[in-house]
Amino acid sequence: MKNYAVFVVFVLSPFCSWAQSTVSTPWLDQGQFQLGVGVGAGRGGNTGGYIRASPYAQYFIKNGLALRLEGRYNYNGPDGNQYAGAGLLGQYHVVRTNRFSAYLQAGYFYGQANYGFYVSNDPYSLYRSRQQYNYGMLNLGVGAQYRLGNRWSVNALVERNVGQRVGSYGADKDNLTLGIGFRIK
């Protein structure tokens, strides 16, 4: 009986240690640095929908925890309204495997919006006035990242921006961004 127990321990020990080991995710470990760009679309307040370009740099300060500096340029609605700004975000990768991660994101953006409107009630009027507003917005998001190879990854992010109303315009609200990233280190 003693020999049987020793045999079971030796046979099952590799499986037990495999089940309890963590998955190696060197692409999300402390010290990793990524660069990338995202393109997206979303909806705002009274400004209608918009398209976006978002270059970023991201550094992992701990395993699965990253700080991200991101620039944003939005082109809003049929009137050509625009937003340009930058933000600092934190990302925590909740689910991590060798190729896939799901993460939560929170941060703050600050930038300048350039809104145009017709001076008269005539929509065919050629005279438009433009106003610029500076404002900030809180950003909350849920995303997923998939590693394509040793250095490349693709990501998708669903975000909600909460910000102040500027005149009759609201901050950007909901958006979906798809991106590609490159791991430097």
Image (cartoon, rainbow, N blue to C red):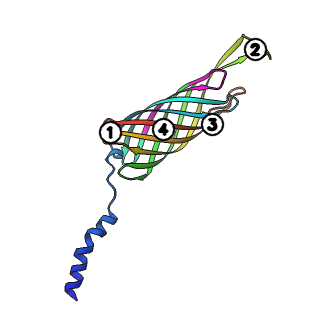
The residue wearing badge 2 is 124
Magenta residues?
A: 67-83
Q: CA distance from mark 2 to mark 4?
A: 42 Å
- At numbered mark 4, what does the secondary structure look like: helix, strand or loop? strand
The residue lying toward the viewer, choosing from 85 and 49, is 49
Q: CA distance from mark 3 to mark 1?
A: 32 Å
- At numbered mark 2, what does the secondary structure look like: helix, strand or loop? loop
Q: Position of residue 12 (x, y in %)?
A: 27, 73
Q: Nearer the viewer, mark 2 or mark 3?
A: 2
- Picture quadrant of residue 61: top left
The disc at residue 184 is none
The residue wearing badge 3 is 173
The residue wearing badge 1 is 151
Q: Residues within 10 Å of mark 1 (few under 14, many from 20)?
A: few
Q: Nearer the viewer, mark 4 or mark 1?
A: 1
Q: Position of residue 171 (x, y in %)?
A: 64, 32
- Picture quadrant of residue 118: top right
Q: CA distance from mark 4 to mark 1?
A: 22 Å
Picture residue at 52% right of the left edge, 39% below the top = 107
Q: Is residue 73 above or below residue 5?
A: above
The disc at residue 89 is 4
Residue at the outermost right position = 121
Three-letter code, disc 3: Lys
- At numbered mark 3, what does the secondary structure look like: helix, strand or loop? loop
Picture residue at 54% right of the left edge, 32% below the top = 109
* Left-right relation of 53 to 33: right
Q: Nearer the viewer, mark 1 or mark 2?
A: 2
Q: Position of residue 94 (x, y in %)?
A: 45, 52
